[in-house]
């Protein structure tokens, strides 16, 4: 397999892995909630397939702002206009990145413990 084939195989595996962590497919009852989410600016967050669940250890409040540790291991402040109003029906904290695969936070729903 040449280098292009190896890169294609790696890309495909990463693509499949992104769906594995995106949403609890055992909870189709939340599909409507995911589809209806939008941040404080009114920008849609998109659907469950683009959501990433965040472990409790990877998000916190610092002062008046939420902070999230993303997949690169770095902490990012969540702009206030990116927060989702209302209850988080998923329970765990959820972040939507845009464009998908980037480290730009489009929406954030704190965990239900807040």
Image (cartoon, helix red, strand yellow):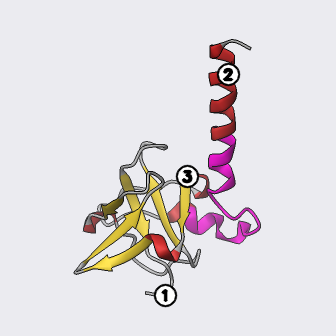
Residue placed at 43% from the left, 56% from the top?
73
Quadrant in the picture for the C terminus: bottom left
- Relative image position of residue 30 (x, y in whole percent): 65, 70
Which span is picked out in magenta? 15-34
- Relative image position of residue 19 (x, y in whole percent): 66, 49
Quadrant in the picture for the N terminus: top right
Labels 1, 2: front one: 2
Most common secondary structure along the magenta stretch: helix
Residue at mark 1: 113
How crowded pointer 2 is (Cα within 10 Å; few <14, some 14-19, many 20+) is rated as few
- Determine contact: label 3, label 1, CB under 8 Å: no
Residue at mark 2: 6
Is tag 3's residue or tag 1's residue first in the polypeptide sequence? 3
- Determine contact: label 2, label 3, CB under 8 Å: no
How crowded pointer 3 is (Cα within 10 Å; few <14, some 14-19, many 20+) is rated as many
Residue at mark 3: 50
Give the mark count. Answer: 3
User: Would residue 16 be counted in the magenta stretch?
Assistant: yes
- Of the pair 111 and 81, the residue shown nearer to us: 111
CA gap between label 2 and label 3 equals: 26 Å
**22 left or right of 111 in image:** right
Q: Measured along the vertical axis of the image, is residue 29 above or below residue 3?
A: below
CA gap between label 3 and label 1 equals: 22 Å
- Of the pair 67 and 43, the residue shown nearer to us: 67
Q: Residue furthest right?
A: 26
């Amino acid at each position: 397999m040449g280098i292009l084939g190896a890169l294609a195989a790696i890309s495909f595996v990463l693509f499949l892995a992104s769906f594995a962590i995106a949403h609890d497919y055992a909870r189709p009852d939340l599909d409507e909630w995911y589809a209806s989410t939008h941040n404080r600016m009114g920008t849609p967050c998109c659907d469950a397939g683009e959501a990433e669940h965040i472990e409790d250890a990877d998000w916190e409040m610092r002062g008046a702002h939420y902070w999230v540790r993303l997949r690169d291991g770095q902490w990012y402040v969540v702009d206030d206009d990116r927060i989702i109003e209302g209850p988080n029906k998923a329970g765990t904290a959820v972040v939507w990145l845009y464009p998908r695969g980037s480290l730009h936070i489009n929406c954030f729903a704190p965990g239900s413990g807040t």
